[in-house]
Image: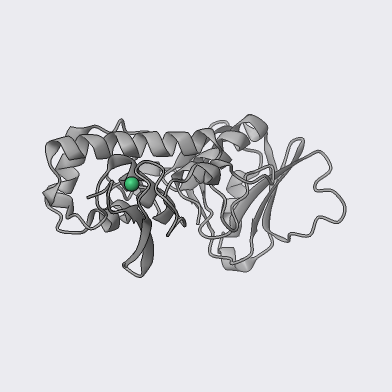
Amino acid sequence: LPELPEVETVARQLRSEIRDRTIERVSIVDNLLQFPARHTKTLRGARIREVSRFGKQVALEVHRPGEATHWLLVHLRMTGRLMWFAADGPAPGYRSQPRARLHLSGGELWFSDTRRFGTFTLTTNLQDHKKWQLDPILDKLTPRGLSLQLADSQQEIKAWLLRQDRLVGIGNIYASEILYNAGLHPQRTAASLEHEEIGRLCSAIRKVLQAAIRHCGTTFSDFQDSRGEVGGYQRFLKVYQRQSEACGRCGGEILRIVQQQRSTFFCADCQG
Ligand SMILES: [Zn+2]
C-alpha cells in the first residue's frame, strides 16, 4: 500500500516528465473508474501546470485559458500506478492494461491498477478534499502542533499514527519505523506522551519519511514508481518485518505484535 513517501516519489518523477505538457484527450478504459465524460471534456486541451502530492493522492493542476484551474486527483489505493511513456507509448509486449490513458503532447500517461480500487477526482477546490489536520512533510510539523493533536486521544500511539484524519500518509510500514526511531512503545496511549517524547516523535516522523523519500519509497509487493522501478528504502528498515532478528541498536530481539489486526514490529528494550 503506497504511503506518503511512495506517493511523493511518483509525484516528483511525474513532475519532471509531464509538467507543461498539454492534455490532448483522455480515454477512460475502465468504467468502474466512474469518471464522467464531461470531466474528460474539461481536461481536453488543458495544460498541466504542476504535479504534486495532495495527502496520499497525486494531484495534476491543469489549466485552460479563461477557465478556472482544475485539479485531477489520482488515488493509487493498493495497486494503482501512473506510468509515463514518451512518444510512442510502451514497448511492444508491455502487458499491463491501463484503466485510463491520458494522451499528452509528446507521450502518454497510463493509469494501471490491477485491484481497481484507485480513483480519479476532478475538482476546482482542493480544500474541499482535505480531510486531514496535518501533512507531516508539507505542514512544518512541530512538537507543539503535534501535542495539540495527541492530547485528547486515548488510542494507542501506533493506531493513532495510522489515522488519516490527523496526520495524513503514514501507514503500517512507517508507523513501526517511526516509533522505533523515537524509542516509543507502540502500545503507549497517545495522550500519555510527555513533552520530550513528543519532541522525539516529531523528529522521528520527519526523519523517517524524508529518508524514505530520498530513497524513492519502500517496495514490498506492488509499488513501482512512474518509471516502473522499485523503491530502495526497504534496505534501511530497522524493524518492519524483522521479527526475531537482532535490534541494530541494542542487540535485543525484535518482536511482532498485532494491533487493530495489523502487525507492529518493535524492540521492547529500546522502546520500553
Ligand atoms: Zn533495541
Q: Is residue 192 left or right of residue 137?
A: left
Q: Is 144 above or below relative to 242?
A: above
User: Which image quadrant is residue 257 in?
Assistant: bottom left
Tally of numbered tags: 0
Asked if one can make out residue 145 in the rendered structure from this viewpoint, the answer is: no
Asked if one can make out residue 147 in the rendered structure from this viewpoint, the answer is: yes
Question: 151 or 46, which lies in front?
Answer: 151
Q: Is residue 95 left or right of residue 68?
A: right
Give the x, y percent position of residue 266.
34, 53
Question: 78 or 127, which lies in front?
Answer: 78
Question: 27 or 266, which lies in front?
Answer: 266
User: Which image quadrant is residue 33 in?
Assistant: bottom right
Q: Is residue 105 left or right of residue 33?
A: right
Give the x, y percent position of residue 232.
58, 41
Q: Which residue is at a point 50% across and 58% down the rendered structure image? A: 77
Q: Which residue is at a point 17% across and 34% down the rendered structure image? A: 144
